[in-house]
Amino acid sequence: MALTPQFGSLVPTQVPQLLSTNYLQWDNNGGGAGVPENFADFAQQYLPEIYEAEVERYGNRTLSGFLKMVGAEMPMTSDQVIWSEQNRLHISYDGVSQANGSGTTSVITIPVADGVSNVISVNDTVVVLDPSNGLEAKGIVTASTIGAAAPAFTIQPFTGTSLTTQGLSLTGLKVFVYGSDYAKGSDVTGANARTSINPVLTQYHNSPIIIRDQYVVSGSDTAQIGWVNVATEDGTDGYLWYLKAESETRLRFEDYLEMAMVEGELNEVAATKFSNPGTQGLFAAIQERGNVQTAFTPNLTEFDAILKNLDTQGAIEENMLFLNRETALGFDDMLATLSSGAEGGTAYGLFENSAEMALNLGFSGFRRGSYDFYKTDWKYLNDASTRGAINGTNSIEGVLVPAGTSTVYDQVLGTNIRRPFLHVRYRASQTDDRRMKSWLTGSVGGASTSTLDAMEVNFLSERCLITQAANNFVLFKGA
């Protein structure tokens, strides 16, 4: 007597046939506990129409690429990177105060601070500036106190009147040396002895962090074939779901390699700072040693103020602007407003501004003063899963990065070297390269390294970001 299957059972056949006993039914009522929605009834003879490929509703989801555009990667073998940056060449002091001396002279007092000493010599000629009212005075140094607790020097103004008489404030002044003036036949000994100035380098350092990630899949799951054709940004394609999971873990880890360099912070917690010291990323370096433009809204007046500040720094001619969408559009609007009246009409577009051709309402670069700027969107600041979800007061909306290289003194090599302003250092030696390591463990996927019935995919990198001459960088923050 033949076995009659109950309703809902599946009966296999020798050849593919459309029978009511071997196909799933699409059920809109949903299943019970542990049963996927729409797969509760097995009586329907036809399968639903199924799209095999995934829909890429978020487009290319990777965020890396910023450091590849502006920096480089170099190996190192130590736990710490130390570099020295040059200080300014000329003698200048800010925040000095003045008082009347004997006769028409004035006494300039230099504020005591770490690493600050008086190196102004007798017969130096100086300019004294008052930022509060724009007044200035010039004179010659007649006496100078070196190495005292309150370093000071005496100036005889060339006008024959004291600084107070000339209207300069008592505090908050700036003074700098522009030369010297000696009498005929004079010597530089005794009271006229000059102060020998030794250059002082400012040292900075950063430490690499170890970044890790892992994906684990059991041996049984690697043999499971699905009905969705998975595809990822790195070209992985197939019906094995673990391939997609492994590929996305790798892509996510590659993004972490850049995100950690951008967002990294030094750990100041005493209990953990030695085991997990952290690293100084791009944002932290600019906020500590660079320029932060708060409440930034793109307009010519505010942007020109940034240029004036760049003039006081390295004055790097070529710069890159990496901006979020709102700030990038603000720059476009600013430039379009400036350009709208040129040549008697709209002065930007494609194909000679023909009304029948495409009009380009964006700008990829511009020149202002002696500086060239190349503007690009930074996906990291636009993506909703990262900083793109936050806009408002103090939110990071862009960064200005100088192009080219800088010269620094390398403590290990013992010489001056040229490096990109922004570059990554990773741990590597002849036996182990930790720039981007990946390896398999377990007994699945060709590893066969243990009795574990699974495949473990491991990712590791050890690296840090070097931000040289951060005084030439600008971080834009929202209003």
Image (spheres, helix red, strand yellow):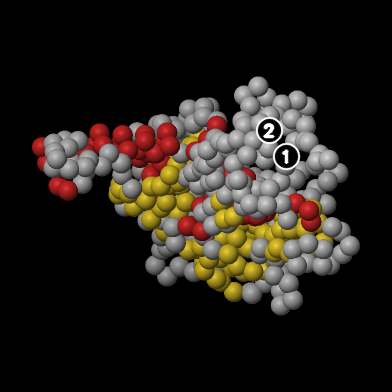
Q: Residue lying at the far right in this picture: please name it.
A: 451
Q: Position of residue 323 (x, y in %)?
A: 45, 42
Name the foreground residue: 123 vs 363: 363
Name the residue: 64% across, 69% down.
75
Amino acid on which the number 2 mark rests in the picture: Phe
Q: Quadrant of residue 32?
A: top right
Name the foreground residue: 192 vs 138: 138
Q: Position of residue 351 (x, y in %)?
A: 17, 48
Q: Position of residue 225 (x, y in %)?
A: 67, 52
* Relative height, residue 186 to residue 321 (above, below): below
Judged left or right of residue 248, residue 300 is left
* Relative height, residue 54 to residue 296 (above, below): below
Tag 2: Cα neighbours inside 10 Å, few (<14), some, or many (≥20)? some
Q: Residue lying at the far top in this picture: please name it.
A: 29
Name the residue: 41% across, 56% down.
316
Tag 1: Cα neighbours inside 10 Å, few (<14), some, or many (≥20)? some
Amino acid on which the number 1 mark rests in the picture: Leu
* Label drawn at residue 324: none
Name the residue: 81% across, 39% down.
3
Q: Secondary structure at mark 2?
A: loop
The answer to whether any part of residue 140 appears in the image is: no
Q: Quadrant of residue 437?
A: bottom right
Name the residue: 83% across, 40% down.
1
Q: How many marks?
A: 2
N-terminal label among 1 and 2: 1
**Residue corresponding to mark 2:** 42
Tag 1 and tag 2, C-beta contact below 8 Å: yes
**Residue corresponding to mark 1:** 10
Judged left or right of residue 45, residue 446 is right
Name the foreground residue: 93 vs 426: 426
Q: Position of residue 373 (x, y in %)?
A: 36, 50
